[in-house]
Structure formats: C-alpha cells, structure tokens
Amino acid sequence: MASINEQLREQARKLLADKVVDLIIGYRKGSLPLRSTPYLVKTEEEAGSLIFDLTSSNNLAKYLPRVKTENRGSKIGIVCKGCDGRSVVQLIIEGQVKREDIVIIGVPCEGVVDTRKVRKKTGGEEVLRVSLPVLPGSGGREIMVEGRGFKITLDKEEVLCDVCLGCQHPNPPLYDLFIGRPREGSSARDEFKALEEFERLSSDERWRYFEHEASRCIRCYACRDACPLCYCEQCFVDETHPQWFGKGPDSSDTLIFHIVRALHTAGRCVSCGACVRACPVGINLNPLWVRIEKEVKERFGYTAGLSLEVTPPLATYDENDKQEFIL
Amino acid sequence: MSEEIFKLEKDNLEGFLLYLSQKYNLFLPRRVDDQLSFGQMKPGGKPSLDHYFNTDLPPKEVFFPQRETLLSYEGGEVKHSTYKAKPIALFGVRPCDTKGIILLDRVFAEGEYEDPYWKARRTNSLLLTLGCNAPLSTCFCHWFNLGPFNKEGTDIFLTDIGDAYLVEPCSKKGEECLRGTSLLGATGDDRKVAEEIRRKAESSLSERVEISSLKGRLLALWEEDLWEDISQKCLSCAACSYLCPTCHCFDIQEEGSQEKGERIRIWDSCMFKLFTQEAAGTNPRPTPKERLRQRIMHKFSYFLDNLGEFGCVGCGRCIRGCPVNLDIREVIKAVKSFIVESR
C-alpha cells in the first residue's frame, strides 16, 4: 500500500490538475527535526512536497479565513486531521468560511509529537536526526531520535501531546476525500483522563497552578495567533479605547488575558493544543481548556466541531439550561 | 590588553561567583520549569550550566526589562525612576548575545538619542562571556562574521576546558575584576586544550551563507511577490521579536488614575498589527506581509544604515521558537536566490 504521503501527494496533484481546488493548505517538511511547517500549495509540482506525519502539529484551519480573503473566488483545499477538521466545522458554523468554498482532505491522525517532552527525554540535548513510524497504522510506535553522542528510541505515547492522549476524534468529522482509511475512534482512551489529577486539586491549588503558568507569559500572543478560533478583527487585549487592562508581563494582566481567551473560546475550542505547542516559554494551560470542554459537554451535551447541524450552546438559549449557579 | 590568561577550577566556581556577587548584581543562566533564562543569583544559588547551550530568553531583559517604570506620581508629586542597585554582571552569556548587547549599546547609549534607563543598568556592568563548545544546528553567528569564541565586547572571556574554565580578561574592567581574585595562570597545555575546543566548535558549524550583498537585494526586492510567499504562514505573533537579543522596540503606557499611577515602558513588536495602527483607522502595515518584511528589513538593511552592522547575531532563538517554523535562514536564502521576472 502506498504511504500516506504518496497518496496525499497524488490526490493533491489530481485536485489541482482537475481544477477542483485552486490551492491547498497542507504541511511540508520543516527546517528542524520533529518539525513540519504549514505550506500553501498552488502547483502540482509543489504538491510533491506535501507530508502528513507525527510532526504535523499546527492547526491549519487557522489559515482558512486569511487565505480565503487573499484569494477571493478561489476554492481551497485543506489537509485536516481530526482537530483541524473540527475547527473547520466551527469556522463554518460561525460564518467565517463557506462549506462550498473548501475541499476538506481528511487524514488519519495518530497524534502529534510534543517537542518539549522530547527535549526532556534527551536531557536538553539537541535532536539532530529522527526517524518516525510510517503512517498509517503501520503499528509502528517507535520514534528514534539521535543527537550528539546519543541515540534513543522513544515510544510515541511517551512524547505525544497531552491532548492527543485523550483524543476521541482522530478523523475530521467532515471531509470530501480521505487519504488512507479513517482510524477507529480511540474509545480506549479516556477523554478527560488528563484532568483527574487536576480536578483533585483545591481551588487555591488550581489558582496557584494557573498563576504559576501565566507568570512566564511574555505577551507575544503566539497562543492566540496560532488558534483557529481567535479570528477577532480586534482582540480584546488590543483595544485602546478604552484599554481594558495592562499590556505588560504582570501576572494579574497575563492571567486575565489567558482566562478571558479561555472563556471566549468556551464551547468552541476543540482542544487541539495548538496554543500550547505555539508557546515559546512552555506555558501549559491544557487543564483549563480541557476542563471547559468537559463542562460544556456535561452541561449542554455539546462537543465543539462535530456537526454543522447543532447550534453551539453559547449561540442559543434554552429555558431548560441549568442555571443553578445564578443564585 | 594583558596577555595573561587565568584558570578557574570548576570546584572554585562557587567562590568566584560569590566574589562577583559582592561587587555586582549578578545574573546567570537559571533553569525554571525547563526554561532557561538569565536570573539573579540568589544566596547559595548555582548557575544551570548542565546541558546549557543558550538561554531560551535573551539576556537583553536584564538591561531592558519587559516592563520598566519610568516615573511614578502620587498627589501631584512625580518621582523619576532610575536603577540604583549595584552594577550588573552577566555570567555565562554566549558570544552572540554579548554582541547583541553591544548592538543595543549603539541604539540606546551611543547614538543620537541616549536612553537613561538602559545606561543606568549598563554603566559599569561586566560581561563574562562563555564560549560555545557545542554550537546548536540552529546557530548561525558565523554568517555575521561572529563565532562561538568571538570575544568582541566582552570584559572577561571563559572557555570550558572540562574541569576548569580558562579565564581571559578582555577589557580594563575585566582585568580589574580579576585582579581581586587569586586565580592562577593557565598553562600552555590548558591553552592548547582550549584552542582545540575552539577549532572543533568552529568546524562543527553548519554551512555559511554569504550575506554581504543582502542589503542591496532587499532594497531591490521591496515590492516583489517574494514577501507574499515568505509571509504566507507567518502568524504575526511576537515570539521572534521577544526571543530576539537585538529587537528593542517599546511602547509607553500610563497605568493608574489621575491621583496615583505610573508611566511604564513595555516591549513592543513590529509584528503586531497594533504597532502601526493609526488613530484615523488606517494602517500602513495591514497584513503579516508588510510586518514581516519590516522586521527583516530592519535587521538586514536599516540597522546597517543606522549603525553600520547587521541587526542579527545568529543566535537562532527565533528559529527554535517560531510556532510555524518560519526559519529566518530560509528567508535570507529566499531573498538571495529570488529571480526578478521582467515586467
């Protein structure tokens, strides 16, 4: 069977040649080991560089509104793993892109690597070469990483992103064509397992955790800018008339930024983890994102990005909504 | 400068740092939550020098904090704030970052406009630069005629030779500082070991790209489509600017009320849309294309015009920290190889 990459390239070439799409948002090999890089493909030749593997960590849905604006009238193909695909569904629901303007190329995701976890495993030594298991479903779990004076083999489960370990939706819920075969839903994984420890903490301890994480924030907004659902024309932190709060690195300000962003994406966030991976100082607010996702699921029976038919809970009102918290 | 080179046994490092901290407000590489940055030496504290290639955040924050109070006021009384603590010493700063500080000296202390806040921290400060025995694959200081053992701008240069450091005074300040220690001279063998380490490190650097013609290329390509291609994936966040040892743009903000408050300055970045947002609602750099081009032009063209040198030192932090792997080396290569189509 041809590899995912070969199939992806062939299908992409075909979509471009048949003028089904004018361009494709995908990934190509990055300049560093364990990194891919987002890639806008316009020619059949460029399609030959497309890849999809354990390093395809950016959420490509981020680029849809922008690429659409910059290429009016074009039909856009987009390579989607599960979480990218769910973000696309959210963007359609929220009126940011039109379903008929895009062609979703589904890919079966086996998770993406958290380079910080790898850095821990190598004791901070630089990784110079890697070999990854070939997708799909080769059953291969071994990632070999090599650097100056070391060569170690890692089980991919040890170095996948936290959110991938609880992922229930490895395939995009909506697609026009699928590369390879959709993966079985990973029911063996407990969606909210990563929260167990966090939920045992007292509210004071949880507050301290958030404060501690936010204390490293340098206000670069890589998290916001990597988030496919942070598409506001003017983000609340950029308001100047009035300016809502301070712009420096004081933790009172940084924490409010992160919390308000979390509230603004409640019921929309698909827990793709792109914000956490984007952070140059390793702030991990995953527990906050996942906890909010759980809250929305428990209260409203809603999981973001799965269906175009269901109205998101924060976009509607139901008399029967739980409201015991009001009084 | 004196020809004398000393030797500091690693067993005596603690004592040496203690000596420095008596005279100086000492900053050194410290690992907190797996993040390395320059932090103040605490009593009994040690530098994090194991697996130390470079800090994740640049040392510019020591002299140019991300948030700095310029003045404070209360009930009609205004207080101007200046740095008054002991002079600052940086131990273990890498040669690229030392060069970064020297470039910022040109901006803040030696140019037409003097910045009293930078000067207050930088005056009488001491830089103890540590050579890089093992440059990273993302290091490209050699593109700028620097190198893992470049001594420019430093007061004291250290080379890790295993159980000890070779300690070389490189300025008057450095000499004076070392005069107060009881360090012994290095032997010829020590120097040979250091020389071998230097040679090995330099030969391990990745391929060097010639960039002397870059400025002219950039000016000629200002309006080309190239910038659209390069910036396509840019998220326009400020990770690159804030990780950069030479980016130095700032904003001034008022915090507080009419009665009591502070005027502060905070880091800012040309990658933000807000950076050039005009009151009339217009913005001369409306998309990531114009903003990324600005950042590249500043580093490789305007810096040359203003200060005669490139504004990049090849530390590679922006390469390691970019959330979309937008590699500045690839940008430079793309600019160099871009072929202008005749119109």
Image: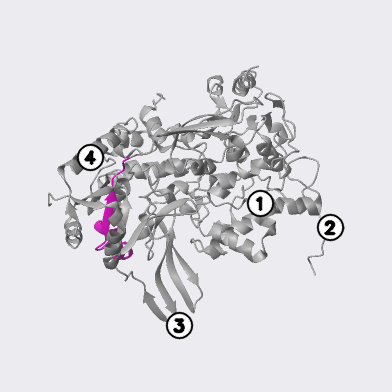
**In the rendered image, residues at marks 2 and 3 fall on the same chain:** no
The quadrant in which the N terminus of chain A is found is top right
Residue A48 covered by magenta stretch: no
Element at label 3: loop
Q: Nearer the viewer, residue B186 or A23?
A: B186
Chain of residue at mark 4? B
Outermost residue on the top side: it is A1
Whether callout 4 and callout 2 share a subunit is answered no
Farthest-out residue, right: A320
Q: Which residues are magenta?
A: B105-133
Q: Nearer the viewer, residue B222 or A57?
A: A57
In the rendered structure, find residue B75 and report the number of the disc placed on it. 3
Locate residue B97, reporting x and y percent.
Answer: 32, 49
SS for dot 4: helix
- Sequence order check, earlier mark of 2 and 1: 1
- Judging by the rendered image, the residue that carries numbered circle 4 is B193
Q: Is residue B109 magenta?
A: yes
Q: CA distance from mark 2 to mark 3?
A: 51 Å
Q: CA distance from mark 4 to mark 3?
A: 63 Å
Between marks 2 and 1 in the image, the one whose residue lies nearer the viewer: 1
Q: How many angstroms separate mark 4 from mark 2 (CA)?
A: 74 Å
Q: Is residue A311 left or right of residue A110?
A: right
Asked whether the residues under the numbered discs 4 and 1 touch, taking CB atoms below 8 Å apart as contact, a structural biologist would say no
Q: Chain of mark 1?
A: A
The amino acid type of the residue labelled 1 equals: Trp
Instruction: Indicate which label's residue lies in the foreground, 4 or 1.
Output: 4
Foreground tag (4 vs 2): 4
B252 above or below A164? Answer: below
Q: Position of residue A274 (x, y in %)?
A: 59, 44
The label shown at residue A321 is 2
Label 1 sits on residue: A289
The percent coordinates of residue B238 (x first, y second) are 47, 49
